[in-house]
Amino acid sequence: MSFDIIKGMATTLKNIGKKPTTISYPEQERELPPRFRGRHVLHRYENGLERCVGCYLCAGACPADAIYIEAEENTEEQRVSAGERYAKVFDVNLLRCIFCGYCQAACPTGAITLEHQYKLASYYPEDMVYHKEQLLEPEGQATSGSNDSWFESAPADAVQPVPQESHVFDGSQASAAAVGLGDYPIEEPILLVNDEQDEDRRKLASRKDELQP
Ligand code: SF4
Ligand code: SF4
């Protein structure tokens, strides 16, 4: 028996009895974290009015150009949302969407959230353009969706280091601080070794000194 086979058998024996990391989907489903970003939902207020006021901010914030909106004026006879306008057409192309959540963050009325629906598949690309009728909560339902979990601050172990505040990035002095930029008080700028590459930084650093009172 070659050494490779013995090595392979040892790996098998080592893992016998361990809990599998896979699950038997679709019979079993994973419990998703509260901030999981799946398919969008459009929300209503308790009185049934739509939260979306057709302001286009979500479409403007979308880096993938995945949202298409046509806004229409509300009238006294036909009031759909609480604002001046409402979204007559609201489409999200889930083939373009990268589920970044910028649309949710940009929305001033909490109208759009990314929820836990992740079963998004079709043989036909046109099925992946979700329309307002599919995205909007049914009448009689008024939830704020995952906005609730985003209002709470992030768990301590999920907090990301911000170099501008700590002046440390990946264990080293952050680059902006290292060359005397940013708000890091240092006695003299520490420049990199390559003179040519440092030229711009030197200029900026000296300009900063000139501007300081
Ligand atoms: S989640 Fe991101 S990519 Fe998807 S529609 Fe919203 S802003 Fe666009
Ligand atoms: S979902 Fe929000 S951001 Fe997008 S158009 Fe409606 S109100 Fe504006």
Image (cartoon, helix red, strand yellow):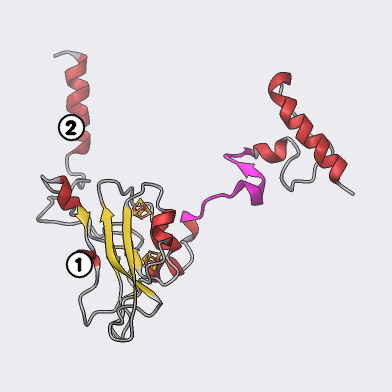
Q: Residue furthest right?
A: 213
Q: Left of 169 or right of it: where is 194? A: right
Q: Residue at x 9, y 56 (%)?
A: 27
Q: Quadrant of residue 209?
A: top right
Q: Secondary structure at mark 1?
A: helix
Q: Residue at x 18, y 32 (%)?
A: 12
Dot 1 amino acid type: Glu
Q: Left of 209 or right of it: where is 195? A: left
Q: Position of residue 139 (x, y in %)?
A: 21, 79
Q: Position of residue 146 (x, y in %)?
A: 35, 67
Which residue is nearer to you in this view: 36 or 46? 46
Kindly identify which residue carries mark 2.
Answer: 12
Q: Residues within 10 Å of mark 2 (few under 14, many from 20)?
A: few
Q: Left of 2 or right of it: where is 59? A: right
Dot 2 amino acid type: Thr
Measured in 3D between alpha carbons, the distance from the residue under mark 1 to the one under mark 2, in whole angstroms, is 51 Å
Q: Cβ of disc 1 within 8 Å of ligand 2? A: no
